[in-house]
Image (cartoon, grey):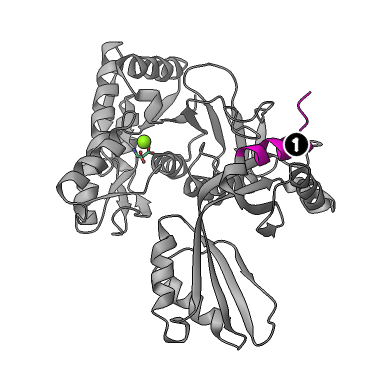
Amino acid sequence: MALIVQKFGGSSVADAQRVMNVARIVTETYKQGNDVVVVVSAQGDTTDDLIEKAKEINPNAKTREMDQLLAAGEQISISLLAMAIEGLGFPVISLLGWQAGFNTNSVYGSARIKNIRTNRLQAELAKHNIVVVAGFQGINRYDDLTTLGRGGSDTSAVAIAAALHADKCQIFTDVEGVYTADPRKVEGAQKLDEITYDEMLELATLGAQVLNNRSVEMAKKYSVELEVLSSLNPVPGTIVKEKIKMEKMLIRGVTKDTDVALISVVGVDDNPGVAFKIFSKLAHKNINVDIILQSVGRTGTKDVTFTVSKDNGPIAVEAIRELPQLEDKEIKCKTDVAKVSIVGAGMESHPGTASKMFEALYEQNINIQMISTSEIKISVIIDEAEANRAVNAVHNAFLPND
Ligand code: ASP
Ligand code: MG
């Protein structure tokens, strides 16, 4: 007998039929003699719809009230799923985040889990109940509801698996696993049998939608082995773990992220401290900067270029304008750009990887505006209109479609 945590995303519980389908998967696992904890997200687009509702009433609502609202989405899905499981004749109880012991900090809208008091969970499992837990939510030290940030139910599931030392954490979704590229957009995208935490973390951060990156971080930290699999099609999924068997695969995936704004500060003085001033200002405003490029100084000036998320583009421009030394400088903000990346632990030991990627883009006559690399990834910034073509060309260069 094992303890299994199963997580189902919003699309897997979108309507009554899908909820029944999940109830069948869960009870099947229970019937095999396992203890089962199920974590669910809000149904379908519920969270987006709730956000829209709030905007109609007050676009600047306090984050505390937003969390109070958004937590309701998961409350609906846990109770409905519990009713479905009960209808199939199995013992079940649904728990909200706070009832399941999720203690978080007080950063409403993107709270971090501090710990999980597992007594209630354990007591319910001891009674042989299937335990259905609301993902994405917890409670802070003021007894107020908090949410973990969009896509946070993955993190809830991994946290429970870690806290209960579960034997398995299965993340059910509407695709069959982790693919080498978005299978809807790239012909020949392949499902991976296995992937390392580090590779998955890069893919998740670079725009692959399948797992939330915080959940992967946590899985790595607590060595929780994950399986990503389909709730609609019962075939083996993708295992995410520390070490995987060596395969002759140079890269594991190609991603596209269109949530990018490219900002250039043109003709700043070529003196010490300019980069410091710009980026400390941005840090102060809580703006995450991704790729940074500084041109070589010529005739006493240089350009500083960097990327942020699209939302943060105008905020970043305004923040820089507030710097007295830079008020009269030209600041450009381009939002029609995308980041295309390749990820793979194999590239660490293969010197030709970058040139192969650049060649594939060159053959498509796609201009690279910025490049950034780490041990296991290479990213380029290009025109957004060329992004799909770029992903296909790069995928085909590394993982030929035959
Ligand atoms: N329902 C939340 C969201 O849509 C959490 C989740 O889906 O994981 O972001
Ligand atoms: Mg959702």
Tell me where residue 14 appears, x and y as whole percent.
Answer: 34, 23
Q: Is residue 329 above or below residue 234?
A: below
Percent x, y of residue 372:
67, 59
Circle 1 Cα neighbour tier, 10 Å, few/some/many (<14 / 14–19 / ≥20): few
Q: Residue at x 42, y 38 (%)?
A: 157
Residue at 35% across, 34% down: 41
Residue 114, above or below 258: below
Q: Is residue 271 left or right of residue 12?
A: right
Q: Is residue 205 above or below residue 237?
A: below
Residue at position x 24%, y 48% in the image: 67
Please count the marks in the image.
1
Residue 319 percent across, percent down from the top left? 40, 73
Determine the residue positioned at 63% across, 35% down. Answer: 181
Q: Looking at the image, can residue 71 be seen?
A: no
Q: Which residue is mark 1?
A: 245
Say if the magenta span includes residue 68.
Answer: no
Query: Most prominent secondary structure in the magenta stretch?
Result: helix
Instruction: Where is residue 98? Give x, y as percent.
Output: 25, 44
In-front residue for pair 371/314: 314
Q: Who is closer to the viewer here, 76 or 34?
A: 76
- Residue type at mark 1 is Lys
Look at the image and say whether residue 389 sits in the magenta stretch. Answer: yes
Magenta span: 388-402
Left or right: 352, with 102 as reference point = right
Residue farthest left in this picture:
57
Q: Quadrant of ligand 2?
A: top left
Secondary structure beneath dot 1 equals loop
Of residues 371 and 263, the one drawn nearer to the viewer in this rendering: 263
